[in-house]
């Protein structure tokens, strides 16, 4: 079963106010169209989906610039949160929340990521919550969405500034294709299978020889 995104809540990201549940987007099946005039937040929605699923900030931002500017909020600190409700690959209701804090310092804005939370309702209706360090959460998301990080990053939620990657330099292009199709992993897996097959042929032969020797001597 493929995973299905249902609802995105954004607060404190770019022009979305830090007040909780200020920006909510219902994600429709099979497709959601995002329309609006320039500067109304269409890119921010895709950036937030990419951030909540992969933990990646938009290109070149390192978090500052992605969080609502503390100067605009007239605060020294702004809390940001992105929450995504979705059905995982088993059809179970799941929810992932990632949070950030931006602090206005004399030299500029610094951004700190807080631990994320992943919640899932099991088939018996019980709710399980995993409070998770960012790296663990990235792995959880790949498992529950059933899509690799490279596909989330470069295909499904590819940032408009990065969307020309198929026209990039051949070395980088090769790397991208390797990441997306996991070619190296398949080659390694095939090597492993071949060597296991060889071992599995050799081992029965050795057993057969030992058995033969045993039979010879037992006479
Ligand atoms: N750090 C920030 N704090 C507050 N507002 C911000 C911040 N960064 C960007 N913005 C504002 O957020 C909005 C960004 O909107 P976004 O780029 O998502 O719009 P868009 O609908 O995709 O626009 P376009 O059609 O031009 O691509 C702009 O109005 C911008 O001024």
Image: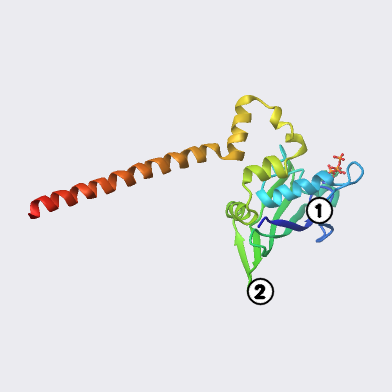
Residue visible at 80% across and 46% down in the picture: 44
Camera-side residue of 182 and 10? 182
Quadrant of residue 86 within the rendered picture: bottom right
Disc 1, SS: loop
Q: Quadrant of the C terminus?
A: bottom left
Q: What is the basis of the colouring in this image?
A: rainbow
> Eyeballing the image, is 218 above or below 42?
below
Q: Is residue 144 visible?
A: yes
Whether residue 83 is visible, yes or no, is no
Secondary structure beneath disc 2?
Answer: loop
- Disc tally is 2
Left-right relation of 215 to 15: left
**Residue located farthest toward the top when viewing the structure as drawn:** 169
Q: Which mark is residue 125?
A: 2
Q: Nearer the viewer, residue 19 or 132?
A: 132
Which residue is identified by label 1?
75
Residue 125 position within the rendered picture, expressed as x and y whole percent measured from the top left: 66, 74
Question: Relative to 118, is 74 above or below?
Answer: above
Which residue does the image show at 82% across and 61% down from the upper left?
21
Q: Work out whether mark 2 precedes mark 1 in sequence or the reverse, and give the earlier one.
A: 1
Give the image location of residue 121, x and y in percent. Answer: 66, 69
Q: Nearer the viewer, mark 2 or mark 1?
A: 2
Q: Is residue 151 left or right of residue 218?
A: right
Give percent across and percent down for residue 169.
65, 25
Q: Nearer the viewer, residue 187 or 8?
A: 187
Quarter of the rendering occupied by the N terminus = bottom right
Could you say where residue 39 lies in the image, as x and y percent from the top left?
Answer: 88, 43
Who's the residue at 61% across and 52% down the image? Answer: 142
How many residues crowd around disc 1 within 10 Å: few (fewer than 14), some, or many (20 or more)? few
**Image quarter where ligand 1 lies:** top right
Tell me how far mark 2 sits from mark 1, CA to CA: 41 Å
């Amino acid at each position: 079963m493929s995973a299905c995104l249902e609802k995105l809540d954004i607060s404190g990201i770019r022009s979305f106010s830090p007040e909780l549940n200020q920006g909510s987007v219902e994600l429709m099946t099979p497709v959601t169209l995002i329309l609006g005039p320039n500067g109304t937040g269409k890119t921010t929605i895709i950036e937030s989906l990419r951030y909540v699923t992969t933990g990646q900030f938009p290109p070149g931002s390192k978090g500052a610039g992605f969080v609502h500017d503390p100067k605009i909020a007239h605060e020294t600190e702004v809390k940001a949160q992105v929450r995504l409700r979705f059905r995982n690959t088993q059809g179970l209701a799941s929810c992932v929340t990632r949070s950030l804090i931006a602090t206005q310092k004399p030299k500029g804005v610094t951004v700190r990521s807080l631990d994320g939370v992943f919640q899932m309702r099991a088939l018996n209706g019980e709710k399980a919550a995993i409070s998770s360090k960012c790296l663990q959460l990235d792995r959880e998301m790949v498992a529950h969405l059933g899509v690799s990080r490279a596909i989330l990053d470069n295909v499904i939620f590819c940032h408009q500034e990065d969307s020309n990657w198929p026209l990039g330099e051949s070395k980088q292009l090769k790397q991208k294709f390797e990441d997306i199709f996991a070619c190296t992993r398949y080659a390694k897996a095939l090597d492993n299978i071949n060597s296991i097959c060889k071992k599995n042929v050799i081992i029965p032969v050795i057993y057969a020889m030992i058995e033969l020797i045993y039979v010879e001597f037992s006479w």
